[in-house]
Amino acid sequence: MLSSDCLLSWTRVILLGYIILLSCIASTTRLILLANQTARHAVRTVALRADVNHALNSIMPANLKGDLSFLASDTLQDRFTPSPGLDAAAEFTASQFRAAGLEPAGNEAYFQTVHMVNRRMRDADGDLKIQLGTETKVISGKAFAVVAASEASIITAAPVLIVCRKDPELLKKLDLMPQPTLPKLPRQEAIAVYVKARAFDRLVQSAAAALELTVTEGPERAPSQLVTEENVSRHRVPAIFGNDKYLWHLTEARNGNEKITLWFQIPAPQDKNVVLKNVVGILRGSEPELKDTCVMLTAHYDHIGTTETGPR
């Protein structure tokens, strides 16, 4: 519990909690924060400005339940970014700001917009062929998910480099150009090696490898990606996930003296221009010496989507 010694004099107080961005300003009133609702303290009554009182009175249990019921409804399809459901959530939040009398603070009324490209990977066009010495193995394209690519490409007889995990130190002593890499990444180690994996990916990109193939333990989905407009044309080393017994055998029992080459065709991604929105509102205060200060709350109004709108 916070005592009356913890009284705060704020010029901006957050009002609505389900928004993407809200900066609200109160007057010179003091706010008492109580962690224990059963505590009893003598509190001096302070008159609130009319607009502040209106905003506070709009936060009622029934209203919050209605807001959450709408935002969590099936109609919004779990608000994937981007999706029509997310746009509907943005419009709804803006309408609540408008009803509360908040000042628009975006470049388009309450919306702070940004133009991006939503990139989805297509299914593999054909099978993957691997040659190990004199042995040739063809693996169905259905065993693979293309998870990253900036353009269509055909990989022909590219030498393969196998590493046991996504550790950049394993690549620094090797010649990657123009070899595909086959990192074996067990699921139970995924979180622990995340930082190293990101560094590994950056090194693969800088080395201009032909392909990055990660051998997985189960089926994978190709996620969509949001790409800034200036990065749409930037080359990205293609990356695929594959789940096949032969690939596991290859990573576990390979003789280092045997040459491995690989053939595969990468499809072009599907790019769609989208406009994403933050929702921003301001309630101005009246205390001159605090006019350049603020209290700000940020929160997501998007979510993970459905099988139709989210990652495939």
Image: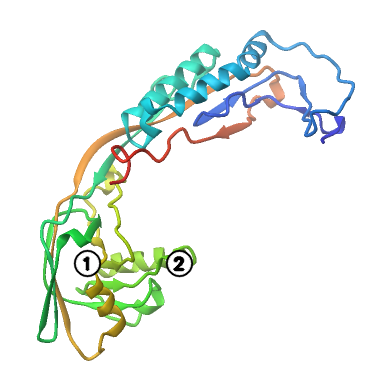
Quarter of the image where one finds residue 44: top right
Spot occupied by residue 22 in the image (x, y as percentages of width and height): 55, 27
Q: In this view, does 288 lie to the left or right of 307?
A: right
Q: Name the residue under label 2.
A: 188
Of badges 2 and 1, nearer the viewer stands 2
Quarter of the image where one finds residue 50: top right
Q: Is residue 283 left or right of residue 264?
A: right
Q: Mark 1 points at which residue?
A: 211
Q: Is residue 216 left or right of residue 154?
A: right
Spot occupied by residue 36 in the image (x, y as percentages of width and height): 80, 33
Is residue 102 depicted above or below 150 in this figure?
above
- The residue located at (13%, 55%) in the rendering is 152
- The residue located at (60%, 14%) in the rendering is 58
Mark pair 2, 1: CA separation:
24 Å
Labelled disc at residue 84: none
Q: Is mark 2 on a helix, strand or loop?
A: helix
Q: Is residue 87 left or right of residue 148?
A: right
Is residue 54 depicted above or below 302 in this figure?
above
Q: Residues within 10 Å of mark 2 (few under 14, many from 20)?
A: few
